[in-house]
Amino acid sequence: MTTGKTGEPHDRVDGRAKVTGQARYAGEFTAPDLVHGFVVGSAIARGKIVRIDAAEALALPGVLQVYTHENTPRLAWRDRSWRDMVAPGGSPLRPLHDAEIRFSGQPVALVIAESFELAREAAGLVKVDYEAAPHETRLAEVESEAHEPARGKKGYTPPPKPRGRADEALAAAPVRVEATYEHPPLHHNPMEPHATTVIVEADGSLTIHDKTQGVSNSRDYVCKVFGLASDQVRVVTPFVGGGFGSGLRPQYQLFLAVLAARELRRSVRVVLSRQQMFTIGYRPWTRQRVALGAERDGRLCALIHEAVGNTSRFEDYCENVVPWSGVLYECPNTRLEYGVAALDLYTPIDARAPGAVTGLWALESAIDELADALDIDPLALRLKNYAEEDQDHRRPFSSKALRDCYREGAARFGWHRRTLAARSMREGALQIGWGMATGIWEAQQAPSQAKALLTVDGRLHVASASGEIGPGTYTIMSQIAAEQLGLPLAAVRFELGDTALPPAMIQGGSATASSVGSAVLAVCRALQHTLLKLAQALPDSPFGGRTLADVEFVDRGLRLRSGVAPAVPLAAIMRHAGLGSIAEQATAIPDLARQSRYTSNAHSAVFVEVAVDEALGTVTVRRVVSAVAGGRILNPKTARSQILGGVVWGIGMALEEHSMLDHGLGRFVNHNLGEYHVPVHADVPAIDVVFVEERDDVVNPLGVKGLGEIGIVGVAAAIANAVFHATGRRIRELPITLDKLL
Amino acid sequence: MLPGMGDDTCAITLKVNGSTLRLQVAPWTTLLDLLRERLGLTGSKKGCDHGQCGACTVLVDGVRINSCLSLAVMRDGASVTTIEGLAEGDALHPLQQAFIENDAFQCGYCTPGQICSAVGLLAEGHARSDDQIRELMSGNLCRCGAYPNIVAAIGQAMRPRRDA
Amino acid sequence: MNRFGYTRASDVGEAVHAAANGDAAQFIAGGTNLVDLMKERIAAPSRLIDITRLPLRAVKSLPDGGLEIGALVSNSEVASHPEVVSRYPLLSQAILAGASPQLRNMASTGGNLLQRTRCYYFYDAALPCNKRAPGSGCPARDGVNRIHAILGASEHCIAVHPSDMCVALAALAATVHVTGPAGARAIEFAEFHRLPGDAPERDTTLQPGELVTAVALPREGFAAHSTYLKVRDRHSYAFALVSVAVGLRMVDGTIGEARLALGGVAHKPWRDPTAEALLRGQKPDDALFAAVGEHLVRDARGCGHNDFKIALVRRAVVRALQQAVAGGPRA
């Protein structure tokens, strides 16, 4: 029997479903009346549709309809109806709303046919004539027009006010480094393409299987846009084939599938092609300037970090790129600035560790440049400037075991054997480089609810409308519940991804364990409370006058912590009360009064060895050590996997990934997985993950900080720093492809 | 031209996970779409539909292929094994078990393709080291980045079990 | 993908006959490229002629000491065939450097020769492309051309041939056997693929309706001194930015015979006999190799993003020649 303790490694409870092909994703639900949609995207980046001719497509037997802006009904009128829970400020895209083209690949038609193949063929027959208008997709051309983002995006915090006089301090600093860093747009490319299956139920209500990181977000969006009551729409998504942020907002296939289902009164599935996955959001193209001034002993005296990211012309996507620079190192004079500049592209969307990945790539490269300028070991320089409190908000950290990350990571890596100078480590024809960087991410908690049903047969069903994009939500929630009630893991079933369940936060920002986990904890505490009260009514109850602090739930029973008596079975307690089951529901709300007195972050230190074949410019990542301070670790097995994934993303960002824009066409041209390179097996070496001990009773009742983001933050800088150490060449524009090293 | 080969649909016989099926298929239906849309075997995944991700990997006559680039009509007479056909009753295939034990997946979407590919890899018998496993599994992308654990799982399945 | 007719041929004559009867019929074997192209409406045959049941699966030794590989032998089978591994390791290495095991299991020898370019613009039906839609223009020239040609390109097309196997076959001076409406003929490998010129829509010199039946390798396989060096954007499963196939016959420390072909740089595998002549009769050394590299790119021209390929060819040629002299990539 596997006991359901937290802190112990457990195999995933949904593992069997995933290795046998039984786990069902959004595009895999079906209905007898199902028809298929295929999207036609615009060929130009800006302008107008002057004519759409769908006659040839409609003439194919089995094609039911072609929706365009000409025959799509007018829907919600106000922008706010189209704005989902995490939309940035602006006017969201309204697919098939008018003749206006705002970005290349914008959906201009939806073909509905009896089969997928037929819909795809017919989509190729839809003829669209455009009147093109001048477009701009070059960041450098609009950088000077960068503006403060419009208000509205949840989680966005404008940069803090300057501290001290950074520009004067920089000018006076004995040692200075200053550089510009850039990375291109990057598409998430989860393995599962975005997909929606809308099933029209007999009563006319809709059951929607949508690839989303938040079922409630999709449900509310559909209700607002189509003017439906919330009981008319149920979104059910038990599995998501990767999100990484791309599923935070409803993507256009959701709208299109619902549109067609309502018009045709038939069940509809719309799946984006891989090419079309490059017509939705992406990590924005960002250019950053970092200037550091230091005393000769390495103490920072000036820090300036300015960033401009791209957005679309119709929404102000924004992210927290620069605030980390004010909090990670101690520095009396800082100036942090951030703006967004509009291009004729679709709106970006949060991508794994949004903002932090970007900011830390620049900051941690610059710190390495400073270490080189000072002839100081890069780790020693970071320790010298270690921040003991959040200077921007003048408050302590709720916990910060970053020093332990540095120490344990360096020890595992063997950092002390590194020679200081660039180009000083060789191995035959290969230049070897060791680089490191720091990572940081915000520990967050958002309100969430859960319900639980304990039955007399000893089974516990817990549920919350959270998601499972891959972190192991099913598993850790089951562990929390099993531990609280003293049940074996197998006796617990956790259900998620259904708007019929109590609402949970959108799965993002590494906050699911914290938020939904706290709700599961709360509902289990409620069960405990009820069970204790019932136990007190037992004849000769040993629990009279006792509180929950005096008892423990073990071995499917309840017992006194102090006693030696065997546990009283929960089943006996319930039977005595004449109860077949006990149901509870609970809400976990962050303790803001307490949390706001602290700054709570997860941290990491990542160490990388690269081998560079200088003649050919190729870079091989040979090993990685990632040491993470992420609070309490609920399941070391799934936790390690999250960090592995972050590191692999970092390898991709540093060396391979690049959504290439043809500026003449205003279009991403390498829109496939053959030419948009994500890491393959052969690119990924052994990765050593270390979780350092970190206790934190402020962040949330579980003491967890979340791990989905922290693993990627800093990795790109660590690799770039290792490449510098290997070759003496500082690459400030990602990805570090071989042409940049020739 | 063989009898029964009209321009619209063709009669084929496929053995899928041990069951022999007689099917009428349109020539433009890929093996992947046939499995997913007609036969309800959605374990084989569509990640790119262009042979660039490996999520659709199945075994045809024991050989791993990309089912998205294979026309079903051309597989007439073949034996197809998908992820749904690997376990024997409740007993998982050793690779399935190894994937669970090594946490060799996260979102699970690439997993059936990874496992079928690994079955093919073991049958081919060319991989002897972790680096060879990496090279010979590089046709299967995993965006969650479970690669180290996948390599560990395959390595575990390659070694004879101590208790065997 | 359009709707199309399907014919399953049972012998070569029937296949060729069926092709001659349909104006837009195409042969299909592995399908790894053609099905891909059809899904994007880059290819839209009226009829597919399934040739997978033809008796073209043999690998046989030829009387002249060469080796003949049937057109339907899969790339995996060729790469692991004992005769190929021992006598033509260059071919085996090149094949294993390409695609993925799954694709190699499907892809046929004949089909590999007929792979079409991976140019982004060719693959995007919404965009102009002279290769796909003759006369529509070439946006790659002023667009994103990182993966494009530096040698032998024309104003109409700067696409490159994507095959690895073909680069080895060019170096090995293979012969392609075809059968068509006018009968059977043999095509020297150097003549099989063509440069784009003003007809970039044509990749090869195959005549309409001709079917590749076999590839024949000459006796000399350069087994002791050959290498395939592939430089790409990730460590596996990516097309070559530049690749070099080298075969040397060493005689008493001197290069007796040299073969060298480049991939990723032109509309066809790029073999330059004048570069090979520079090596013949010489003692191997790095200065000589550098001179050969320099010679190979003497007419090279970049379009901006792909300028780096010129320097990369120089370096990759030196590395490949060093490896070949040493006996192979791992030596």
Image (tube, rainbow, N blue to C red):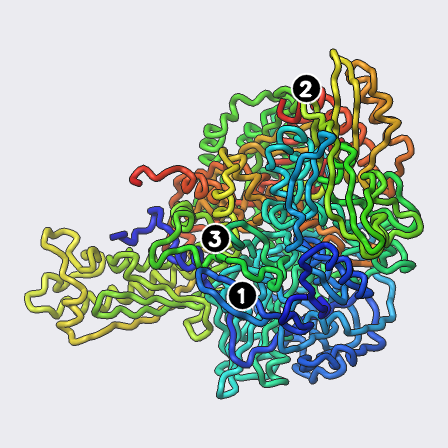
Residue A738, how many percent across, how many down?
A: 72, 36
* Residue occupied by mark 1: B13
Q: Nearer the viewer, residue A392 or C42?
A: C42
Q: Where on the picture, by quarter, is residue C293?
A: top right
Residue A271, how many percent across, how many down?
A: 61, 67
* Residue occupied by mark 3: B106
Identify the subunit bearing mark 3: B
Residue A658, how many percent across, how many down?
A: 70, 48
CA gap between label 3 and label 2 equals: 44 Å
Q: Nearer the viewer, residue C13 or B95?
A: C13
CA gap between label 1 and label 3 equals: 36 Å
**Nearer the N terminus, badge 1 or badge 3?**
1
> Which residue type does callout 1 highlight?
Thr
Looking at this view, name the residue that lies furthest to the left: A540
Q: Where on the picture, by quarter, is residue C51?
A: bottom right
Q: Where on the picture, by quarter, is residue A516?
A: bottom left
In front: mark 1 or mark 3? 1
CB atoms of marks 1 and 3 within 8 Å: no
Q: Is residue B137 visible?
A: yes
Q: Nearer the viewer, residue A669 or C81?
A: C81
Residue A327, how many percent across, how many down?
A: 56, 44
Is residue A451 placed above or below C33 in the rendered structure? below
Identify the subunit bearing mark 2: C
CA gap between label 1 and label 2 equals: 52 Å
* Residue occupied by mark 2: C326
Q: Residues within 10 Å of mark 2 (few under 14, many from 20)?
A: some
